[in-house]
Image: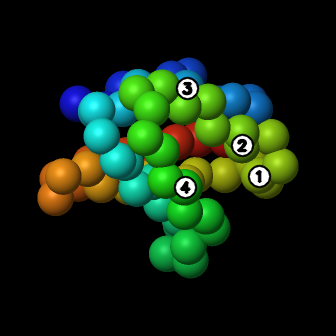
Amino acid sequence: MVRYYPNPVNDLLHLELPMGKNNISVYDLSGRLIETVIASDSYLNYDMGHFTSGLYLFQVMNDGKIKRFKVVK
């Protein structure tokens, strides 16, 4: 299970992730890949401070399972 907060976010998006290797991809609304991060910890503070205001799509892949969600900056 993936938990994320706050939404909308100012600078730091807090992610609670499943155990194991998590492949996190961030996309803009046009579908362009912004960044990919690999996290092996259960918690990640993702810095969105340098992002422009808008809507972003996150995809978390862990053990073949995919979770997608939208975040407002």
Outermost residue toward the left in this view = 64
Q: Label 3, label 1: how many angstroms apart (C-alpha)?
A: 15 Å
Of marks 1 and 4, which one's residue comes earlier in the chain? 4
- Left or right position of 49 against 72: right
Whether the residues at callouts 1 and 2 have beta carbons within 8 Å, the answer is yes
Q: Residues within 10 Å of mark 1 (few under 14, many from 20)?
A: few
Location of residue 52 with respect to 49 vertically, above or below: below
Whether the residues at callouts 4 and 3 have beta carbons within 8 Å, the answer is no
Q: Residues within 10 Å of mark 2 (few under 14, many from 20)?
A: some
Of marks 3 and 1, which one's residue comes earlier in the chain? 3
Location of residue 34 with respect to 72 vertically, above or below: below
Q: Could you say which disc has been placed on residue 48 in the image?
A: 2
Q: Could you say which disc has been placed on residue 33 in the image?
A: none
Of marks 4 and 3, which one's residue comes earlier in the chain? 3
- Left or right position of 48 against 71: right
The x, y position of residue 11, in whole percent, is 75, 32
The x, y position of residue 52, in whole percent, is 79, 53
- Which type of secondary structure does the marked residue at label 3 adopt? strand
Q: How is the image coloured?
A: rainbow
Disc 2 residue type?
Met
Q: Which residue is mark 4?
A: 37
